[in-house]
Structure formats: structure tokens, C-alpha cells
Image: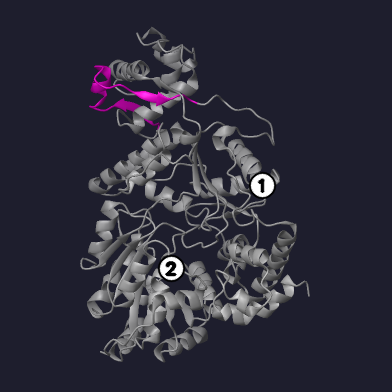
Amino acid sequence: MKSPNHHPVPLDILQEVFGYSAFRGQQAAIVDHVTEGGDALVLMPTGGGKSLCYQIPAIARQRAGHGVTVVVSPLIALMHDQVGALEEAGVAAAFLNSSQSLEEAQHIEREMLAGRLSMLYAAPERINTPRFLAQLQSLYERGKLALFAIDEAHCVSQWGHDFRSEYLSLSLLHERFPDIPRIALTATADDITRADIIERLQLEEARVFIASFDRPNIRYLIVEKDKPREQLLRFIQDEHEDEAGVVYCQSRKKVEETAEWLRAEGINALAYHAGMDSELRKRHQDRFLREDGIVMCATVAFGMGIDKPDVRFVAHLDLPKNIEGYYQETGRAGRDGEPAQAWMAYGLADVVNQRRMIDESPSTEEFKQVQRGKLDALLALAEAIDCRRVRLLSYFGEESEPCGNCDNCLNPPATWDATQAAQMALSCIYRFHKSHGYGFGAGHLIDVLRGKETDKVRQYAHDQLSTWAIGASLGEPQWRAVIRQLIALGYVVTEGEFNTLSLTESAREVLRGEVQLSMRQPSAPTRRGRGSRSGSSSSKPSRASAVEADLDDEAQARFDQLKAWRSGVAKSHGLPAYVILQNVTLAELARVHPGTLDEMAGISGIGAKKLEAYGEAILEVLNGD
């Protein structure tokens, strides 16, 4: 093995290659540790700058003679855009994946083996092949294997929200190449997932870096379902007209129906799910990345590794499975640091469906128990009457103060003592079972509690029960909220294909008056027409974009001209516009209006290669030539 050479100063690489003057947060400590050959596990939120944590050590170690860094990446789209961005910055990088011809793949393999690459991106499936492992062995024996970077490392954990079995075999890297440093990175991992990553990737000796999970630019909004598609439409029209966003739905059918409905309402919406034709799916993803103002309706198949910085909102029309999934998905909004929103609508059916999916899965009871606990944490977040962000960060073990930028902080919800109502509901469920030996669904329970005469009530003589009409003073939305929270708190469970309700052992505590239940007051049903404002609970973040906020008319004109120029360059390179230059860099160019290349060199986001490649063209745009 080759002995380590002196490594270039990482800060010099940050400035020269990427055009940034300083590291953020823990980036400097991570980069120094990995550059010097240390193993690391990095937990850093989406938009926190994870990529630089391995890209700069890769460049530094390659310049010091250590050879190529292999980056494990699960998605073709992510590989393509990251390699494109590195090439734009003058870094020798490539990827190997199924989209390439045999000749293309062989050419890249030759470049790698000849030591001409700083970074090679590949999927775990390829890395595990005998051919690729033999190539790694050749590099290793010649001292030309610098670093392994394992991105989206939560995929290795069975407890995580996105488990991928092919990640399990990545422990081979440490077993075969024990003295090659490794860095594993993820944006989301609770304690149990974190421990799983360390064990499965054999990172017991690695230094663990945990950045703050807070994304202060994201406003969290959770609403009760009341004609959810119309609620979504109002949210988009009122808050994010002509802006990019993602709408997550649980089923493929709902994805397509939602996209079609939004298009009919004048929203530029596309669909994306794993069941679509692969060419159409790729075309939709490319349009989302390269065009402005597209709303992507998708299942969770869409999103991992999507680097588009100007996604202004992420909406959920269905409840995710757990907080990690919710956090990962909402974190795709506002990667540029500008104000963004995470909006979710959920209701009783979501709670019932998620519990049923866990109960009916073929998993072990241990796994189901963990998943129930994760779902309970998400339900507690949804039903919370205090700060959403405090709850969210607490889940990841981080203490915080009320944020002032979530719906509960901005408009504290009205609450009521629901203890007596909960006792009524539990008593009625008990009497169903006592009378019939089985339970009934939530809708029928509410009818009995409110004294609503229906065919089913008459069929089962439930108007003769002692609980008939005892809750007539409460409206249906309140009762649905009570039942939803009783399920969320574990006092009631749903069973069978008809989602009948049964009591748990802990329900006795409520019936005996040993616990007090304070619940949020349900929102009044909304029946506004199209285009009306959606209320102060989701008041529009001040978006006089910190990017464009202080541009005068002349600077704004320069900014618009630069965007048009960038669009043409991006199209000719087959890359998203933000890979060429980000909006914040264009805005600074428009504001500062540099007259020479030397003056432009100080602009954040313009490294040496971009200055050389685009400097003269930018000066021409700025001077109106």
C-alpha cells in the first residue's frame, strides 16, 4: 500500500473548485477527518451540504496520489446530476449504471483503472459484482483506491423508511479493503436506525457527526382532511402559484388522478410512480428538474437524491409511514435556504389504513412493534397542540425552543377537555362487543353517539343501547378527532377488513378517569371558492426571496437576463439550470455587477473552472452585449 502523501488544504479546494469562501457547520471537521483517512458516519439534513463532505476529501486524496473515490449512490438521476455538477466545476468524475452502453461502461472502467478519475458513482448492485470487485482489488493493490462514500446510508437498515437489501452486502468493502476510509451519509436516522447502520456497515470505530436536524426555513403545516384535493388546490393557488412543488400520495392511482385533477384546475402538474413506463417517468423527472413551476404528484418512489434547490413546497395528501419518511420527504423543499412549506392533510382513515398495513404485513412481530412505535410518533406530531418543530427535532434526540414558524406557533390551536367524550366513545365500543361479540366501524360509532337514525342502527337495535345519543352535543368532526386520537394514543385498535374498533387494555385508564385528554379543537369545515385565501394558519412566508429581495429594477433586469442565459447553457449541456449556477449566485452577480473577471472571482458559487468557462459570457450578459 502507498504511504499517505501531504493532502491539499480542504478550504483551498472549497474556494478554488466550488467557489465558496467558508465551510458550514460541521463540514470542516468532517472533511478534515475523512481527508486524513478517518471513517465517519454523517447525519446531516437535506440541503445541509452532505455532498461536499465526501467530494472535497475525494479531490484532496486524489491530488495527494491516493486515487479514486467510489461513491455508492442508489439512483441514476442523482448520479447523473452530481457528476454533471462536478464536471462543470472541473472535477474528473463519472458514473456507471444501467443507462449506459457496454462501450460507454468499458471506457469509464478504463478511466478509473488508469487513475484519471477523482470520483466514480455506482449503484450498490454493480459494486457487489465480481467484475467490479476485481477492479477495486486492482486499484487497491496499486494504492489507487482513496475512499468509499456510502450515500443514503439509511437504506442499509431494516428499521429505516427506505430499506434496500442490496445495501447489506456493502460490508464487503470493509472486509476486503480494511484500511480504505469510509464515510456513510444520511439525512434521516433515529437512534435504532443509526445503530443498525453502524452494525451493518461495520462502522463501530467511525467518528459520528450529527448536525442539527432543524430546517428553519421550512414552515410545517398540518390540517385535518376536509375535501383534501380542494384544500391542496387552495394551498397551491394562494401560497405557491407558478412555483415548483411535490405532492406525495400513497397509491399510484391517486397520484395519476391528483395530477390530472390539478391540470384541469390550471396547475402545471405531472405524475410519477414506479408503475409508469420508464421513459415517461424519466421524461417527467427531467422536466421537473429543468423547468420552472412544475408540481410533481408522486409516490415515495420519487425524490431521493433530487437536488433541485428551488422546490418551494412539499405536500402530503396521505399520512407517511413514520417521521423519518416525513422528514426526508419534506426536506426536499427549500434546499436553497429560501422560505418553503411542508403541508400535510390527514384524517381518521389515514390512521386506520397505516395501522392495518402494519398489522397485515408478513413481517415479524418485533418489526411490527417498531413500526407501530414510529407511526405513533408521527401521529403525535400530527395531533400536537404545541410547536411542530420541537416535536420533530425531539424525535431525533435534539432539544429546541418553539420555532415561531409552524402552524401551531403562528396560530395556537384552541383546545378542549375531551376526557368525557373519550369515555363516551370507549363505553359505546365496549357495549358493541358486549352485545354482539364484535365491534363496528368509526362511522357507525359516531352515528350511535350522535343519535343518528340509520338502517344499520335499526338493524342492530343500537338505539336501545345506554350510549345512544349521549354525544349528540358534539359534531361529527369532533367525534372523528376524538376517535382518531384514541387510536393514535393506543386506547383503541382497528381490526379486520372492515376496520372495526376494539378497546385495548389501557382503555381502562381512561374509563376510570385516571388520565385527562386535552385535544385540539377541530377546524371549522371550509367551503371557500376557488382563488380565495386559505387563512392565516398558513399565511404566506415572506418570499420576497432573500435571493431577489434587495435587487433594484436594474439588478432585477440583469438577474432575469442571467437566468435566460443560464437556461440556454443548461439546455445545451443536458443539465438542470441550477447545476450551471444557482439562483443565489445569479442574484449576487446581478447585484454586484462585476466589470472584470477578477471582480467576478469573489462571487460565491463561482470556482476557477466556471470562471474560465463562463466568465466572459456572463460579463457580456451583464453589459448588455
Instruction: Give the x, y percent position of residue 501.
Output: 35, 27
- The disc at residue 250 is none
Point out the image quarter for the N terminus: bottom left
| Residue type at tag 1 | Glu
Residues 572 and 213: in front is 213
Point out the image quarter for the C terminus: bottom right
Q: What stretch is highlighted in magenta?
A: 498-522
- Mark 2, residue position: 51
Judged left or right of residue 451, residue 268 is: right
Classify 10 Å Cα crowding around label 1: few (below 14), some (14-19), many (20 and above). Answer: some
Residues 390 and 157: in front is 390
- Mark 1, residue position: 241
Residue at 60 percent of width and 32 percent of height: 535
Classify 10 Å Cα crowding around label 2: few (below 14), some (14-19), many (20 and above). Answer: some
| Residue type at tag 2 | Ser
Label count reads: 2
Quarter of the rendering containing residue 352? top left
Q: Which residue lies furthest to the right in this view?
A: 625
Give the secondary structure at mark 2.
helix
Q: Which residue lies furthest to the left in this view?
A: 205
Colour mode?
one colour
Residue at 63 percent of width and 55 percent of height: 294
Instruction: Give the x, y percent position of residue 455.
Output: 49, 15
Give the secondary structure at mark 1.
loop
Residue 344 counted in the magenta span: no
Residue 508 counted in the magenta span: yes
